[in-house]
Image (cartoon, grey):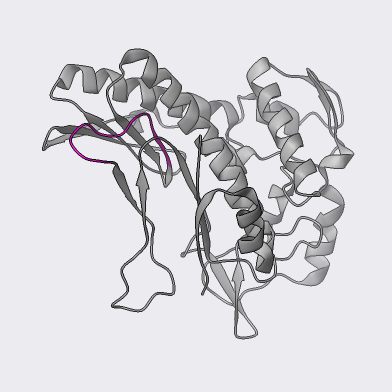
Amino acid sequence: MNEALHTIAYKTSQGFVTGHFTAMAGPCEVIIETSDQELAEKVTQTVADEAWRIESTFSRYRTDNIIYRINNADGDPVEVDAETARLLDFADLCFEVSDGMFDITSGVLGKIWKFDGSSNVPYQNDIDKLLPKIGWQKVSWTNPRLQMPAGMALDFGGIGKEYAVDSAAQLARQITELPILINFGGDIVATAPPVSREHWLIGIEPLALGQNTVPPQVALKHGGVATSGDSKRYLLHNNKVLSHVLNPKTGWPVADAPASVTVLASNCTQAGMLSTLAMLQGKEAETFLQSQEVEHWIQRR
């Protein structure tokens, strides 16, 4: 992590102060309805510090954190701290409720699947070589001890950003009751509706829409919004678009997955779990979210 990149830029407009910074490989912003610049900067710095802390703690690209220790334990047990244990418990829950489709050991598939818009699909034998290294059911997890077969690896990428947004929002609420919107690359929490308007208005990136179609928008008063899907990450295969959401059981993209799923829930972690689970349902995504009785938006190509 390059600490020199830990900078924040501020902009003031129409009674709102917005702080911009980069974390977790994407743009982040904190919007506070206030004229108190000093308070706004204190809140934004607190949120940014939490984002950077969680990124450095759980990034699989570092060699000095708990994820590195777990992934390089070579089959030996590793004792984890309370925060890591909470994430492992949540990952275990996601695995159970998804019938094994939401699997934090499936990140190894990223070695061969490059969703760059091309038609470069991996060979089946390369996929077959990785499948034995996938499967949360092969991991022994009894808090606080985790033991994973040598050659397997954990990746919190599917839950880390939403967790970071919720954690940062909790810290922000301890500083002020003023309305705050926190946006980490499309994973969003609002602590309260703005005083000057009815709600925050969140735009969803339009996919497969006609040029004259108005892109969908979310009216958010409080709670979390998360979107699964990325218009820039796909492959073309046999004249079909392959989603970047992978089925850990087959090693292939989920069949008939939506282009994007956006969910509104009481917090961002819950919204993220539901949007990801819906993507993993493929053609049943709409039915799944209707059964959950949450506000949602699904786009298909």
Which residue is at 34% across, 30% downward? 192
Q: Of 297 and 37, which appears nearest the observer?
A: 297
Which residue is at 79% across, 28% downward? 73
Q: Quadrant of residue 243?
A: bottom right
Q: Position of residue 262 (x, y in %)?
A: 49, 54
Residue 151 seen in render: no
Q: How many marks?
A: 0
Q: Position of residue 201 (x, y in %)?
A: 30, 48
- Specify start and end residues of the magenta stretch as a single range: 188-198
Residue 216 seen in render: yes
Q: Of 190 and 233, which appears nearest the observer?
A: 190
- Magenta span dominant secondary structure: loop
The answer to whether residue 2 is left or right of residue 201 is right
**Is the residue 45 above or below the residue 128 in the image?**
above
Which residue is at 58% across, 38% downward? 270
The answer to whether residue 84 is left or right of residue 124 is left
Q: Of 112 and 185, which appears nearest the observer?
A: 185
Which residue is at 63% across, 66% downward? 257
The answer to whether residue 301 is left or right of residue 74 is left
Q: Position of residue 97 (x, y in %)?
A: 76, 44
